[in-house]
Image: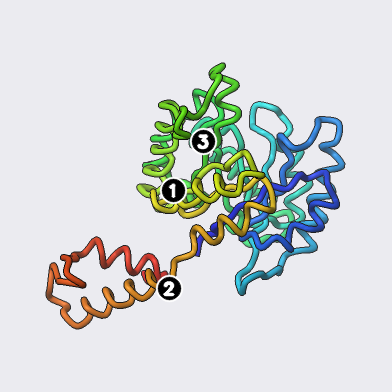
Amino acid sequence: MPPRSWLFVPGDSEKKLGKAMTTGTHAVIVDLEDAVAPAAKPAARALAQGWLAAHRQHVTENRPVARWVRINAIDTGMWRDDLQVVMAGAPDGVMLPKCEGPEQVRLLAAEIYELEQRHRIANGSTRILPLVSETAKSALTIPGYVDAAMPRLAGLTWGAEDLSAVLGASRKRDGDGAWTDAFRFIRAQCLLVAHASGVWSIDTLYDDFRDEAGTQRAAQAARADGFTGMLAIHPSQVPVINAAFAPSAAELAEAEAIIGLFAQNPNAGTLQYNGRMIDQPHLRMAKQLLGIS
């Protein structure tokens, strides 16, 4: 089951890292990029490595908490320094910011492979999650992930803050709170390409963490649109996101009923259920909801 909530935690904050596993998040992203000043990065790498090593088997809500690291972008020259240290902690995955296409993912994958061998980590166990929207070029390369062979690719996610600065955009949302054209275009491509590639689709964060209602609306919209999870910038957003992505008792009951109905009628293409017609897409969605392949 894909993680629903993905919480960023500054890699240079021992206090915040110490609380990360108590938040209920399904995935922790130890941030070595934007959250850490250049002078603090060496210490943050060491702190991140220690934290990763100490939490290899952490479980919450009867599910393991995924341990991810956001390294620095390829063009900074710092990403290899990040990996050299943090891979000793055997992270579950690496988030690549400002990713400008599949070639950068392959470059990162090759480096991870070498470090897995060095640290006796199972080959291929370290996944990659690219942020595919933070520069204009990265946003335009999103369709390239569809046919690219990248076995480490776990999913696709996107962000609006860096891109708005690149574009010089004075707004990201319109007066009704909806994304403006460029950001809506990127979000839709991220969602479609992730599903076309059979990987997770993770919606961007809601930046005003004090606005619980806003976070809830954003998380509910993300799930309704087909995203598998959502980024979080503050621990207070985690339970809101988890609740928004959790299927209700009614949804689970309906999914079980639809699967049962088709099981009783294996040769049927369409069936009636509660006064409406259902067909194979409804069956696929029901199985997806219940985690049945």
Label 3 SS: loop
In whole angstroms, how far apart are the C-alphas of marks 3 and 1? 20 Å
Could you classify mark 1 by the number of other residues whose Cα lies within 10 Å: few (under 14), some (14-19), or many (20 or more)?
some
Q: Which mark is residue 249?
A: 2
For the view shown, which residue lies furthest in the top direction? 168
**Of residues 278 and 274, the one drawn nearer to the viewer in this rendering:** 274
> Quick one: label 2 or label 1, which is nearer the N terminus?
1
User: Is 233 placed left or right of 225 in the picture?
Assistant: right
Label 1 SS: helix
Q: Could you tell me residue 194's position as x and y percent?
A: 42, 46
Residue at image location 61% in from the left, 44% down from the top:
211
> Quick one: label 3 or label 1, which is nearer the N terminus?
3
* Rendering quarter of residue 168: top right
Label 2 SS: helix
Q: Amino acid at mark 3?
A: Val
> Quick one: label 2 or label 3, which is nearer the N terminus?
3
**Of residues 247 and 159, the one drawn nearer to the viewer in this rendering:** 247
Residue where numbered disc 1 is placed: 221
Residue at image location 13% in from the left, 68% down from the top:
269
Q: Amino acid at mark 2?
A: Ala
Contact check, label 2 and label 3, Cβ < 8 Å:
no
**Of residues 82 and 252, the one drawn nearer to the viewer in this rendering:** 252
- Looking at the image, is mark 3 or mark 1 nearer the viewer? 1
Could you classify mark 3 by the number of other residues whose Cα lies within 10 Å: few (under 14), some (14-19), or many (20 or more)?
many
Q: Could you tell me residue 160's position as x and y percent?
A: 55, 32
Contact check, label 3 and label 1, Cβ < 8 Å:
no
Relative height, residue 252 to residue 192 (above, below): below
